[in-house]
Image (cartoon, helix red, strand yellow):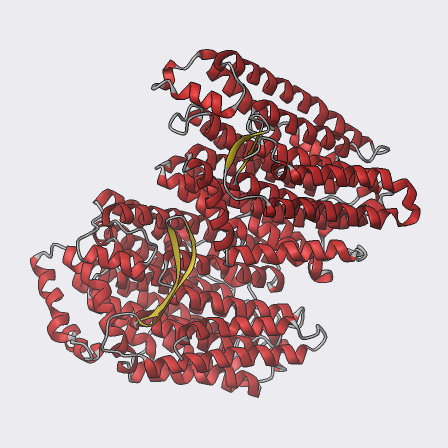
Amino acid sequence: MNELFIPAILPEIVLCAAGVLIMVAEPFLGRHGRAAGAVLAVAGLAGSAAAVLLAPRVPVDALFHGMVTLDPFGAYCRLLFAAIGILMVLGSAAYLRREALPHGEFYTLLLFATAGMNFMVTGADLVMTFVGLEILSIATYVLAGFRRRDPRSNESGMKYFFMGAFSSAILLYGIALIYGAAGSTNYGAVLRFMSAFTHVADLPLLLALGIGLVVAGFSFKVAAAPFHVWTPDVYEGAPTPVTAFMSVGPKAAGFAALIRILFQLVPPDQPVWTQLLLVSAVLTMLVGNLGAIPQRNIKRLLAYSSIAHAGYLLIGLVTASVTGLAAMLFYFAAYLLMNIGAFAVVALVSGPGETRVAIDDYRGLGFRQPILSFPLTVCLVSLAGIPATAGFIGKFFLFSAAMERELYTLVIIAILNSLVSVYYYLRVVVVMFMQEPGEAASVEIPAAAGVVIVTCGLLIIALGLFPSPLLQASSDAILSFLGR
Amino acid sequence: MEHLLSIVVFLPMLGAVGLAFIPRARVGAHRAVALAAALAGFAASLLLLTRFQSASPDFQLEEFHRWFAMGGFQVNYHLGLDGISLFLVLLTTFITPVAILGSWSVTKHVREYMIFMLVLESGILGVFLSLDLVLFYLFWEVMLIPMYFLIGVWGSKNRIYAAVKFFLYTMFGSLFMLVAVIALYYWHGQAAGAFTFDYPQILAAMEAGRFALPLDRQILLFLAFGVAFAIKVPLFPFHTWLPDAHTEAPTAGSVVLAAVLLKMGTYGFLRFCLPLFPEASVTLAPWVCSLALVGIIYGALVCMVQPDLKRLVAYSSVSHLGFVMLGLFAFNIYGVQGATYQMLNHGLSTGALFLLVGMIYDRRHTRLIAEFGGLAHRMPVFAALFMIVTLSSIGLPGLNGFVGEILILQGAFAGNATYGILAATGLILSAVYMLTMYQRVFLGPLNRDENRALADLNLREKLILIPIVILIVWMGMHSSTFLRPMDASLQKALARVQQVRQPPPVIHEVDRLPAGGVGPGTPAPQAAAPTIR
């Protein structure tokens, strides 16, 4: 195959082209700019998905001089990212109008961020992965501070930027150490270098340290303890659709990049960082779930919930098994539906200026607006991992994978955490349906946002009842490189 | 009709989906459609009776489809009916329309209420019919959500506390069960070479000796399954959710809770714990029996000082379910037959009691015993029906409660005389508190003005209660209708645990009894009565 095989990066080309096009075209479209921008963004994202689907299925590493891989794992993740993007555009159009925020820039940044995530999961070289991460991060910093006149949004963008810059530095330092030890930043080359050592203890200290720093750098992105402290503040202050995006996009991309690094750069039979990841998983679950209990603000609640979910996902990394990693990929899809659905409701209920974000503001929403309250309930129930939802299937396989590895204590800790999480997710349901309704007026539901919310709710149940196709796709994606 | 079981399970769900499309304002239509769906479910379940082969101990009318898979993981949609689940299914499909008919006093969000009732029914039926452990877990959990809403939205004052407590307690237990299910999957797979969640397949591997669990693992699994079931039953220290949930739930919620939901726990012990972990069951039986006895006596004592009618009925459930557990863990056919019979009895009589309490609450908006007195003067029909149900609940010979209790006591005495004596004390206490309550509510002078204006039961209320009363008498007079179809399956469920047991001489004779005394098809009580005398 030709070294410069364009179909391998066509999805990213489409995304960037669409992003640039929106920016250039917006000033000329005037009034119709908003709708046209959204249409162009959706077209770009759908085009990238189509490009992923049309690309050859045969796994090829190291195209573009060892920079990019083409394999089912990357395809799976890129399709998820396109789905995230489309749901985001549809869900946030009305929000942008309500808050009088610029549309074009928002969509452009979203498309660039998506392109960055794509490079993170297809990169075959640490440098490529890093560049992808930076494209994503810079776009997200701007998005977090997108409500320029709101101090909370400014704080959020600023905090995220400093934390992000810090984590990038750590990551970069790790990459430098790996390069110093192995003489290359290419996954395949480092893998060959490491495979030469039969005992993990023989590995050069530099290399082990380098991998540790890389893992730490990504732990910031996925909000895993002890690198999670920025999450609640940033999630609370950012515009709600951006919070939704941050909670699913960078998290999934970060985990996907970690999977690649820990299983394609580190030889699969040398689980160097398992013990550390295990500690991090336990800590992350505890911090997330215990932190969520006293929250009164729904965005902060969901922020802690997203920390907790990073903990559950880490279980998949700890198991280092096909079941565990495939469960992670499935969980990405489930998690994106639950979080985008939930945050879409939060964005609508919050009202102009995002003033109504306390859990108490949901009083009486239950029977007043079932179009919002029932899908939100489905999302929360799924986040809690109750059966007949996608969230259950994900947790079921994550826990199964841990049982397969006989990590019994970890599973017990995880289920106790799930129990705690049931408590705080249910609290929202209690407020919506069971407390005396407040006098709050109905929330206007724009068509596109309504479609997103209902679609998320229905898909969560559909995936909970008929998960086979997605499970198959996710295990194929993992086998495509673990099997090799 | 090869999908009869699926039809039975999902017919109510279908009704719920239909309800969602009826405009909110048409309350009458919601009630009618819900009732029709529940009745259709009952009719479908009656078909089960005609197709069921009572001589066979095996699962019948099975349905097996691949459900979902990942890699080697295969989870199946596997339903099956045997003598144990048959009557529990019928009880569920019978009680639900009764409960729906008893919910006319609900006026808030009728459509959603009815949807939750029907989804709840589907969930419970799924629990009783699932033969795949993951499918079982799915139904077990799915049924939580409608019940949670029923208590939390339509309950009385403390409903939110009760609903959340109910949910968290049950969830706590069931998460351990989930871990046990997965552990069983791997341990069975590693030993037998075939990874499956299929209950009959795992059991067959155990029976054939391909898969033997060491005692320590059995105990772990027994405890993990057991905690889920014990919370549901509820066994003594796990019972504290029950009085709250029962008392705060709307009438129909309490009815379904008491009549069917609690049986999911005892059913779980009988279906899974006894056959799958026989050694652990035998090892832990003294503990379980002791807790059951504490529950019997403690529940009864609380009832004696209970000022609130509904709470009284709730605590009496703790006591009665203690009997069921004692019967199950006697490990002989009398005890287990009695326990299964008592599950049905308790479903009918406690269900009816909650309905009756609900009817008086609708009229007076109080449940305090002290507020009543002499009601028999104003409400003769109500008083008469209440009497019958009360007598059924305390086990008057000729009514259903007697058959179950005598069998359980016989089983308990055969296993351990102390258990029998203590349990019999519980029976006496139950007569004391039920009759005292009856006396204070219905007899004596009608000395409160508010009670003078009370109207007797209307046609709908009579329609609700009369079928129950008919069944109460039928089950008391002709128990073989119900005991015979159960027999083969119960023998099979007991087989492994009886094998394990090293029978000491005294018990040995009793263990032999079923073979001679209660052959398949021989109704037990008649055979049993002489032994007691």
Q: Give me the residue at 33% from left, 61% from top.
A: B322
Q: Is residue A312 visible?
A: yes
Residue furthest front in the image: A2
In the visual, does A462 lie left or right of A299? left
In the visual, does B279 lie left or right of B298? left
Q: Is residue A384 above or below residue A280?
A: below
Q: Is residue B33 above or below residue A438?
A: below
In the visual, does B175 lie left or right of B58? right
- State the residue in front, B448 or A380: A380
Numbered circles on residues, count: 0
Q: Give me the residue at 24% from left, 68% from top.
A: B490
- State the residue in front, B400 or B174: B174
Q: Give me the residue at 37% from left, 14% from top.
A: A202
Residue furthest left in the image: B505
In the visual, does B18 lie left or right of A277? right
Q: Position of residue B321 (x, y in %)?
A: 36, 63
Q: Position of residue A370 (x, y in %)?
A: 69, 61
- State the residue in front, A393 or B247: A393
| Quadrant in which the C terminus of chain B appears | bottom left
Q: Position of residue A57 (x, y in %)?
A: 52, 44
Q: Give me the residue at 73% from left, 32% from top.
A: A139
Toward which corner of the image does residue B496 lie, by quadrant?
bottom left
Q: Position of residue A68 (x, y in %)?
A: 58, 31
Toward which corner of the image does residue B508 lie, by quadrant?
bottom left
Q: Is residue B438 visible?
A: no
| Quadrant in which the N terminus of chain B appears | bottom left
Toward which corner of the image does residue B401 lie, by quadrant?
bottom left
